[in-house]
Structure formats: C-alpha cells, structure tokens
Amino acid sequence: MTAARSNKDRILQISRWLAVTFPTPYPTMVRCVKKIAAERGSSPMHKKMGDDGYCVSEGQKIIIRIAVRRGVTRALLIDAIIHEWAHAVLMDEDSDKIGRHDDAWGIMYARIYHRFIDDGGYRASEGY
Ligand SMILES: [Zn+2]
C-alpha cells in the first residue's frame, strides 16, 4: 500500500474501492476537473465557487465529476465523491439522469459514509 500523493490520485483510488464495494448499475467514470459550473439560480458566492461534484447518467454509463480546486481540503473531496457515488449507485433506467436528494439517496450516502469512515474503508481503499 502506498499513500496517494495528490488529491486527484486519492479520489481515483477511492473510486476504484467504491466500484468494488458499492457497485453501480452501469460503469461509472470519475473525472477530476478544475471547476463545475453551479446550477442556475445559485447564489453569487456559489456561482463563483462552483459545485463540488456532479453525477449524471448518459445511456449505459454514469459520469461523476469532482472539482479538485486549488487549496480544497481532502476531507471535502472525500465527502464529494461519497455524495456523488450514492447518486451513482441508485441510477438505473427508471431514475432521473441527475440524482435527487431523496430518502433513498440519504440512506445510501449514510451506508457508504459509515463503511468508509467507521468500517475500514479509509484504510482498505488505500490498497486500490
Ligand atoms: Zn447530490
């Protein structure tokens, strides 16, 4: 096991662990980007910062984007990938293309968070 050096490497490492531990209905691709445009109607502050993450299904695949901004904390990035992965797990042909924060999402988010933080996932993911 080697510790991931950059935030991007760590996010991709955690994504590989997530793909095995919490499978998604379609293959999920994770991309680290510099900025994600905030949704329409966001506050000026939010618009300036952009969103932390984004998850969308496109046909038979799911794409997650994580904003790896200069100076962002690793804890925030980990929260963002867990948040978006919970959307990805719940995406199937009947769901919206962009996930919502309904009860099912909240439960999945809690399950992933618990496995990662309290149940060895943080360490285990370092081997991926
Ligand atoms: Zn969300």
Image: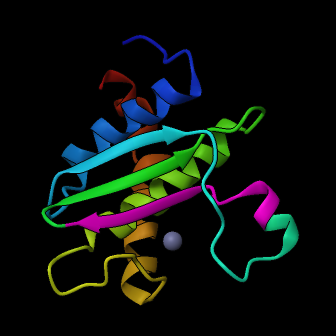
> Residue at image x 19%, y 44%?
20
> Residue lying farthest right?
45
Q: Residue furthest top?
A: 2
In-front residue for pair 60/1: 60
Residue 115: horizontal and vertical position, in percent? 39, 53
Q: Is residue 120 visible?
A: no
The type of colouring in the image is rainbow
Pick the quarter of the image with the C terminus.
top left
Image coordinates of residue 110 in percent, x first then y, are: 46, 68
Which of 37/102 is in front? 37
Residue 97 visible in rendering: yes
Drawn side of residue 48 relative to residue 110, left or right: right
Taking the image as shown, residue 104 lies to the left or right of residue 65, namely left
Q: How many marks?
A: 0
Magenta residues?
47-58
Q: Is residue 52 magenta?
A: yes
Identify the residue at image location x=29%, y=38%: 17
Give left or right: position of 45 versus 111: right
Q: Residue 102: say if magenta.
A: no
Q: Give me the residue at 31% from left, 84% from top.
A: 96
The structure residue drawn at horizontal position 46% and vertical position 78%, both measured from the top left corner, is: 106
Residue 54 picture location, percent across and down: 49, 61
Residue 53 rendering spot, x and y as whole percentages: 54, 57
Toward which corner of the image does residue 102 lie, by quadrant?
Answer: bottom left
